[in-house]
Image: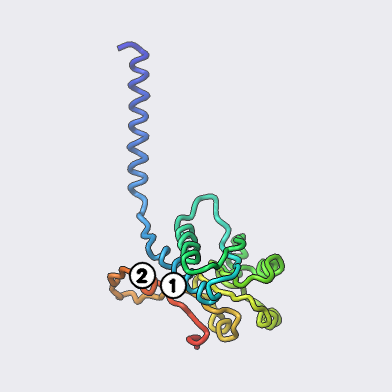
Amino acid sequence: MNSKSWAQVGLLAVLVVAVVAMFFRSSDQPQIDFNPYRALGTVAGEEVSEVLGGKGRIVLVIPEPGPDPDPVMESQLDAFKASLKARGKVEVASTVTVAMDPFQRMSTGGAMPSEQFAALRERHPNMAGQVFFIGFSALSETEWRDLKTDATQRMVVSAPLPGYDLLLREGILRFAIVPRTMAADAAPTSAKTTREIFDQEYLILRADAAP
């Protein structure tokens, strides 16, 4: 075998090793069950459409995407938009991304900083709704009073944050969808429909249910 043939064999061996390594790396990655996230987006779309009577323009507020794709958030948002389209004529007029440095994230608990919320209201007035796939801002009493005169409907899909019960009672939020707290010894049920999957994983907090 001449030197050229040996070189070709060596190249082939390197390629085989690389393919095998990629296979094992990909097989080690945990498989994500996207059903709960799709169910979340679908039901959120249904709830938003119901609040708005199936029509109107909304601004969608999401965390700023990182350098890598976020398939979980993408699955939620795709399902949310498809649900809106299926239920009526609610239009996502604009999508606002919220950027936070680690200090802001720590100080707000992951909620949208109040100054960014103020900028959102200024740049997107007269919207039928604002839908937050991020924690709602902590606001002052003066800002609360101002929001009470605003006809925009505000709806949240996020982790539960202190103050949501008060925001709901005061009418500042129409609803908040939050993860359900599961007991450590609770056995999973065999949820099949979209709503069953949603109810197994999430809760809808409303003004009439707030303590």
Give how far apart the Cα atoms at labels 2 and 1 are.
Answer: 12 Å
Quarter of the image that includes the N terminus: top left
The answer to which quarter of the image holds residue 155 is bottom right
Residue at 49% x, 64% y is 85
For mark 1, does the 10 Å Cα neighbourhood hold few (<14), some (14 to 19), or many (20 or more) residues? some
Residue 78 lies left or right of residue 12; in this view the side is: right
Say which quarter of the image contains residue 37: bottom left
Mark toward the viewer: 2 or 1:
2
Q: Nearer the viewer, residue 89 or 138?
A: 89
Give the residue type that dot 1 points to: Pro
**One can see residue 148 in this view:** yes
In percent of the image, x 41 and y 75: which residue is there?
A: 180
Q: Nearer the viewer, residue 173 or 113?
A: 173
Image spot of residue 11 (x, y percent)? 37, 24
Q: Seen in the image, is 107 located left or right of residue 83?
A: right
Q: Name the side, left or right, on which 77 lies relative to 189.
A: right
Can you say whether 69 is above or below 148 in the image? above
Residue 88: give x, y in percent of width and height: 51, 69
Residue of label 1: 179
Q: Residue at x 47, y 62 (%)?
A: 82
Residue for badge 2: 197
Q: Residue at x 37, y 40 (%)?
A: 22
Measured as percent of width and height from the top left, residue 211 is found at 50, 88
Which SS class for mark 1? strand
Residue 27 or 34: which is nearer the viewer? 34
Considering only vertical position in the picture, is 64 above or below 2? below
Q: Is residue 109 visible?
A: no
Judging from the image, what secondary structure is the residue with disc 2 in?
A: helix
User: Would you call the spot at circle 2 few (<14 residues within 10 Å), some (14-19), or many (20 or more)?
Assistant: some
Percent position of residue 95, x then y: 60, 61
- The kind of residue tagged 2 is Ile
